[in-house]
């Protein structure tokens, strides 16, 4: 997959870039990793422990760290509005990316956006 689209957003995993329309969205590395993990399995509930293990490998992290990053992601994605939810909390189970997604592959003549040096 070269890009994943949902709502007004487009996620470029290889470039570690999220765009809203044509504008890059600032995300920290951990928040990006959480978003990518959720989007890759959109519609599935991913257990808290599995997300933590994927985003913080070989590090002991409290679940509060995950909740803080999820809250910041929701702010970025929902813009503080409750009309459109992308990340759903499934009580005592985990989180689910609940918006429809579409996957894109670029043909050789279409170039994905360049790497964002500020988001490395």
Image (spheres, rainbow, N blue to C red):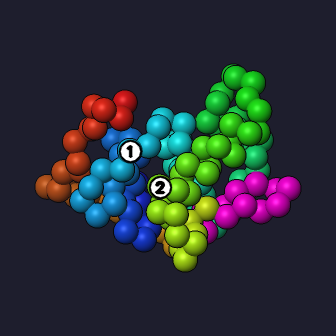
Residue 90 coordinates in the image, percent (x, y):
77, 62
Q: Nearer the viewer, residue 92 or 80?
A: 80
Left or right: 27 in relation to 31: left
**Quadrant position of the N terminus in the picture:** bottom left
Q: In terms of secondary structure, where does tag 2 sit? A: helix
Q: Is residue 109 magenta?
A: no
Residue beneath the point at 69% across and 46% down? 67
Residue beneath the point at 53% across and 74% down? 84
**Residue on which disc 1 sits:** 26
Residue beneath the point at 24% across and 59% down? 22
Question: Magenta stretch?
Answer: 88-99
Q: Is residue 97 magenta?
A: yes
Q: In terms of secondary structure, where does tag 1 sit? A: loop
**Residue on which disc 2 sits:** 76
For label 2, count other residues whose C-alpha is less than 10 Å away and answer few (under 14), some (14-19) or many (20+). some
Left or right: 110 in relation to 74: left
Q: Quadrant of residue 26?
A: top left
Q: How far separated are the C-alphas under marks 1 and 2?
A: 8 Å
Residue 88 coordinates in the image, percent (x, y):
67, 64
**Do the residues under discs 1 and 2 have CB atoms within 8 angstroms?**
yes
Residue 47 coordinates in the image, percent (x, y):
76, 50
Residue beneath the point at 23% across and 48% down? 113
Q: In the image, is residue 63 above or below residue 19?
A: above
**Quadrant position of the C terminus in the picture:** top left
Residue lying furthest front: 80
């Amino acid at each position: 997959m070269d890009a994943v689209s949902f709502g007004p957003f487009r996620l470029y995993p290889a470039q570690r870039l999220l765009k809203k329309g044509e504008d890059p969205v600032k995300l920290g590395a951990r928040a990006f990793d959480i978003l990518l993990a959720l989007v890759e399995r959109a519609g599935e509930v991913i257990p808290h422990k599995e997300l933590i293990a994927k985003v913080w490998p070989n590090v002991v992290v409290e679940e509060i760290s995950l909740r803080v990053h999820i809250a910041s992601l929701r702010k970025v994605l929902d813009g503080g509005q409750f009309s459109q939810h992308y990340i759903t909390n499934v009580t005592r189970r985990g989180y689910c990316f609940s918006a429809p997604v579409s996957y894109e592959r670029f043909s050789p003549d279409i170039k994905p956006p360049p790497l964002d040096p500020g988001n490395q």
